[in-house]
Amino acid sequence: MNEEVEFDFDEILKEFRNGKKLTCKGGLLAPLIKQLTEATLEAEVESHIANDVLGGKPNRYNGFNTKYFLYSISL
């Protein structure tokens, strides 16, 4: 996420005063919430990479189980 979008508080306030909702889908705060969520997830991934991968920890898994698939083929 290298693209930064400026959140225009004055424009949001103007639209809010004109009756547009803040928190509904497509609301005034939706772009800010989206930007905050993406930045948080990006920071979490970067932290994981920095701590685990670059710290020398190998990939880990919870165990080994045989996988079974149920399927049917009709011709």
Image (spheres, grey):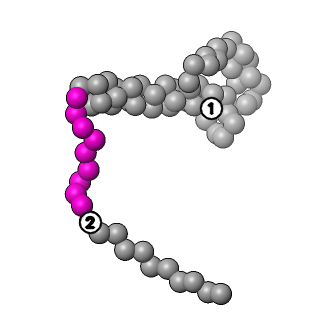
Residue placed at 29% from the left, 69% from the top? 66
Q: Nearer the viewer, residue 4 or 14?
A: 4
> Can the viewer see residue 16?
yes
Counting from the top left corner in percent of width and height, residue 31 is at: 63, 28
Counting from the top left corner in percent of width and height, residue 1 is at: 56, 24
Front tag of 1 and 2: 2
Counting from the top left corner in percent of width and height, residue 46 is at: 39, 26
Q: Nearer the viewer, residue 17 or 28?
A: 28
Residue furthest to the right in view is 18
Residue type, label 1: Ala
Residue type, label 2: Asn
Q: For the C terminus, which image quadrant?
A: bottom right
Residue placed at 23% from the left, 54% from the top? 62
Which badge, 1 or 2, comes first in the chain's sequence?
1
Classify mark 1: helix, strand or loop: helix
Q: Nearer the viewer, residue 1 or 63?
A: 63
Q: Is residue 62 left or right of residue 31?
A: left
Instruction: State which region is magenta.
Output: 56-64
Q: Which residue is mark 2?
A: 65
Residue placed at 61% from the left, 16% from the top? 4
Q: Which mark is residue 30?
A: 1
